[in-house]
Image (tube, rainbow, N blue to C red):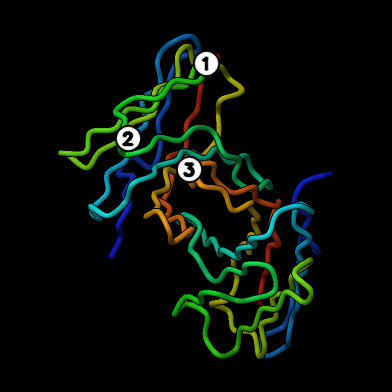
Amino acid sequence: DTGVSQDPRHKITKRGQNVTFRCDPISEHNRLYWYRQTLGQGPEFLTYFQNEAQLEKSRLLSDRFSAERPKGSFSTLEIQRTEQGDSAMYLCASSLVLGYTGDGYTFGSGTRLTVV
Amino acid sequence: DQQVKQNSPSLSVQEGRISILNCDYTNSMFDYFLWYKKYPAEGPTFLISISSIKDKNEDGRFTVFLNKSAKHLSLHIVPSQPGDSAVYFCAALTSGTYKYIFGTGTRLKVLA
């Protein structure tokens, strides 16, 4: 297993365009998370899935954002009508539900979005 | 409201010396704390964690200390190596939520 994969690594788009990112988690992990990181900030939680169910969404996730995880495998994050404020690193992570929650996530390398 | 704070944006340390990175939190419901390391163009990688029932956890050169009464944790790296140069994030979690809250990070530079 090569870890968490994210595609693309970089995306430059014009304001108003739609973009979609993909995340492939570690195969046996049943939880998948999306975070966003802007310059000088730590990762901020956006949403997470347990299997195919989206269990929590942050208020940061406006109605222009939608995430899916069909069949509990890979996930997609779509941003419609992109704005310059959407420019950020979008991080995907996965984990296995365990009794001890201090094991952390495994993050992917992220997708860097630049809206021009 | 920043629930997890890292007040030092950067730190420089000589190779072989101790690096001490600090983190403060405000939410008393947090009961797990983690440190992540991030190199440029890569995602954060898990480094070490501590549960609120402990006050210290060690893993090789890395030790995390937790002071619950002060709502403060610190990461000690001894001895520091140039390869430790990275951005370090502390993160906190309330068990049952599975959602880590991250600090803003401290950029550590270890000078050879």
For image coordinates 55% across by 28% down, the residue present is B85
Q: Which residue does the numbered mark 2 point to in the structure image?
A: B22
Q: Are marks 1 and 3 in contact (CB under 8 Å)?
A: no
- The mark lying in front, picked from 3 and 2, is 3
Q: CA distance from mark 3 to mark 2?
A: 19 Å
Give neighbour class at mark 1: few <14, some 14-19, many 20+ (Cα, 10 Å): few
Q: Quadrant of the N terminus of chain A?
A: top right
For image coordinates 76% across by 77% down, the residue present is A20
In the rendered structure, the residue with mark 1 lies on which chain?
Answer: B
Are dots 2 and 1 on a single chain? yes
Outermost residue toward the top in this view: B16
Give neighbour class at mark 3: few <14, some 14-19, many 20+ (Cα, 10 Å): many
Q: CA distance from mark 1 to mark 3?
A: 18 Å
Give neighbour class at mark 2: few <14, some 14-19, many 20+ (Cα, 10 Å): many
> Secondary structure beneath disc 1?
loop
Residue B104 visible? The answer is yes
For image coordinates 73% across by 86% down, the residue present is A18
Outermost residue toward the left in this view: B69
Q: Quadrant of the C terminus of chain A?
A: bottom right
Q: Which residue does the numbered mark 3 point to in the structure image?
A: A102
Q: CA distance from mark 2 to mark 1?
A: 19 Å
| Residue type marked 1 | Gly
Residue A101 at x, y percent in the picture: 49, 47
In the rendered structure, the residue with mark 3 lies on which chain?
Answer: A
Residue A12 visible? The answer is no
Residue B24 at x, y percent in the picture: 27, 44
Please say if A78 is above or below B49.
Answer: below
Earlier in the chain: of badge 2 and badge 1, it is 2
Q: In terms of image quadrants, where is residue B70? A: top left
Please say if A52 is above or below B90.
Answer: below
